[in-house]
Image (cartoon, coloured by chain):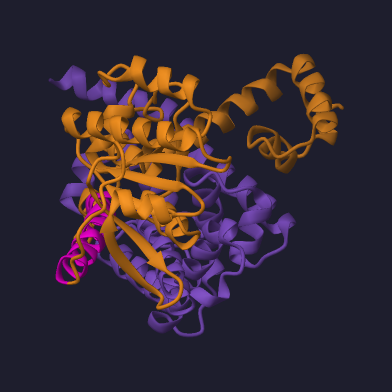
Chain colours: A orange, B purple
């Protein structure tokens, strides 16, 4: 392609990566034969960079502070989830029944969604899991306390051992959001080897990290790429939505 | 549970709007070069987006959809303030103030001034392509113009910027030299 055939529009399209590969080949060929054209392409790139540079820091908006609007979203979700537990807990307390402590499952407050009356019910974990036909439990962590995390891992392991002798279909998910992300973060978590060992031992145990909370950490620490998680840890766009979906599917919810 | 699912969807939509707010503000500022007006335009665009959230059928296209709303708000603003003038024919005059004089030699200010001097149609195209990385097709959809128009506006905009920035830079060197000599 000679220079007179290569319009300014096409050269711009080349710089903006809007050409398909055959068209690009022709432009590359033309560039290799024409110094002036090469110079022109460089200038277009330079202008593009200049424009980006000029608006990388526009004057601050008076009505909007970036961090303020984002800050509450991951924690807000954690707070909403905690509120669900608190409300459920209160209902459960008022209609308290003696717990039938089953085997080695710790006596913790859990919550299930009742399809019949379409409401959340608070119950104790051992009775919930013994009635839970699907044998699916979702454990939610929203603090960076290592003791809580250890408790969650212990509970998950006990439940998995309890279900091991039963029929198939049991599943446990450990979902972390807010500051609990730290405990699934590569290079930060003191539990990396235990998480890995559990994942290897139980194929039906899944660890999930909330993408919202990860983005928040990324923003706070001004990282250029996503937060690195421990191997095998999966990502869910929003922990709260994931929990609600799971509860809708009949999973037992447990806030550790 | 469907109520909760709807609430979640709505929450997700609001979060997406919050995520785009900064980008919308940057684009609005590059169009009007007035922080207060840019704020108002973004506010208006987000209000319309919230009100008409049902019109967004595919959440993947939210970016183009939001810029299109912003572009309409800007067009409406222009029509309200300058009746019967085609926005594409209007060239904004550089507002010369002591502050802008002081900053003129700074790269950022020079580029912003050069962008402000572009006709509105060209300014919108170059900001969407260079600042937001929109494809030509997306820009054509956002501004509701043919793709050929996008390409020609972009080409003309960059030609004008080249003349004002790169070629002026060479001429500007002698001024800098004289100032240093006087010192």
Residue A71 in sight from this viewpoint:
yes
Q: Nearer the viewer, residue B121 or A98?
A: A98
Q: Is residue B84 left or right of residue A142?
A: right
Q: Nearer the viewer, residue B134 or B61?
A: B61
Label the magenta part by its dominant secondary structure.
Answer: helix
- Residue B49, quarter of picture: bottom left
Q: Is residue A152 magenta?
A: no
Looking at the picture, how far across and down is residue B167, in whole percent? 49, 32
Looking at the picture, how far across and down is residue A201, in whole percent? 48, 21
Q: Residue at x 27, y 21 (%)?
A: A189
What span is in magenta?
A69-94
Q: Quadrant of the N terminus of chain B?
A: bottom left
Q: Is residue B38 left or right of residue A90?
A: right
In the image, residue A155 above or below residue A117: above
Q: Nearer the viewer, residue A132 or B2?
A: A132
In the image, residue B183 above or below residue B45: above
Residue A60 in sight from this viewpoint:
no
Looking at the picture, how far across and down is residue B135, in whole percent? 63, 47
Q: Residue at x 22, y 38 (%)?
A: A179
Q: Residue at x 44, y 40 (%)?
A: A172
Q: Is residue A80 magenta?
A: yes
Q: Residue at x 30, y 16 (%)?
A: A187
């Amino acid at each position: 392609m000679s220079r007179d055939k290569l319009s300014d529009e096409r050269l711009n399209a080349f710089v903006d990566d809007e050409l398909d590969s055959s068209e690009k080949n022709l432009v590359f060929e033309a560039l290799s034969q024409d110094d002036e054209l090469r110079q022109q392409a460089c200038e277009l790139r330079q202008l593009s960079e200049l424009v980006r540079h000029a608006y990388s820091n526009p004057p601050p908006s008076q009505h909007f502070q970036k961090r303020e609007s984002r800050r509450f979203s991951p924690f807000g979700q954690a707070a909403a989830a905690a509120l669900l537990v608190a409300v459920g807990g209160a209902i459960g307390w008022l209609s308290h029944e003696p717990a039938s402590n089953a085997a080695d499952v710790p006596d913790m407050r859990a919550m299930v969604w009742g399809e019949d009356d379409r409401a959340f019910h608070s119950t104790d974990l051992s009775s919930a899991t013994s009635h839970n036909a699907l044998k699916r439990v979702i454990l939610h962590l929203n603090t960076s306390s290592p003791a809580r995390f250890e408790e969650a891992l212990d509970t998950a392991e006990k439940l998995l051992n309890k279900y091991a002798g039963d029929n198939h279909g049991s599943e446990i998910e450990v979902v972390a959001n807010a500051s609990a992300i730290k405990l699934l973060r590569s290079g930060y978590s003191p539990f990396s080897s235990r998480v890995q060992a559990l994942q290897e031992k139980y194929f039906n145990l899944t660890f999930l990290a909330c993408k919202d909370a990860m983005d928040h950490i990324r923003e706070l620490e001004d990282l250029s790429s996503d937060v690195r998680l421990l191997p095998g840890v999966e990502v869910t766009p929003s922990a709260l939505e994931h929990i609600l979906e799971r509860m809708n599917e009949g999973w037992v919810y447990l806030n550790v | 549970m469907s109520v909760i699912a709807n609430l979640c969807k709505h929450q997700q939509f609001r979060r997406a709007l919050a995520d785009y707010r900064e980008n919308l503000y940057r684009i609005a500022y590059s169009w009007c070069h007035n922080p207060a007006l840019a704020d108002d335009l973004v506010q208006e665009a987000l209000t319309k987006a919230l009100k008409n959230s049902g019109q967004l059928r595919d959440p993947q296209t939210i970016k183009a959809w939001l810029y299109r709303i912003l572009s309409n708000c800007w067009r409406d603003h222009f029509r309200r303030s300058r009746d019967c003038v085609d926005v594409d024919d209007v060239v904004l005059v550089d507002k010369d103030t002591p502050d802008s004089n002081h900053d003129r030699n700074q790269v950022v200010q020079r580029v912003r001034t050069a962008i402000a001097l572009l006709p509105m149609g060209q300014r919108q195209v170059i900001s969407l392509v260079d600042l937001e990385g929109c494809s030509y097709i997306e820009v054509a959809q956002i501004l509701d113009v043919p793709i050929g128009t996008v390409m020609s506006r972009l080409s003309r905009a960059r030609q004008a910027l080249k003349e004002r920035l790169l070629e002026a830079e060479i001429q500007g060197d002698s001024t800098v030299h004289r100032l240093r000599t006087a010192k």
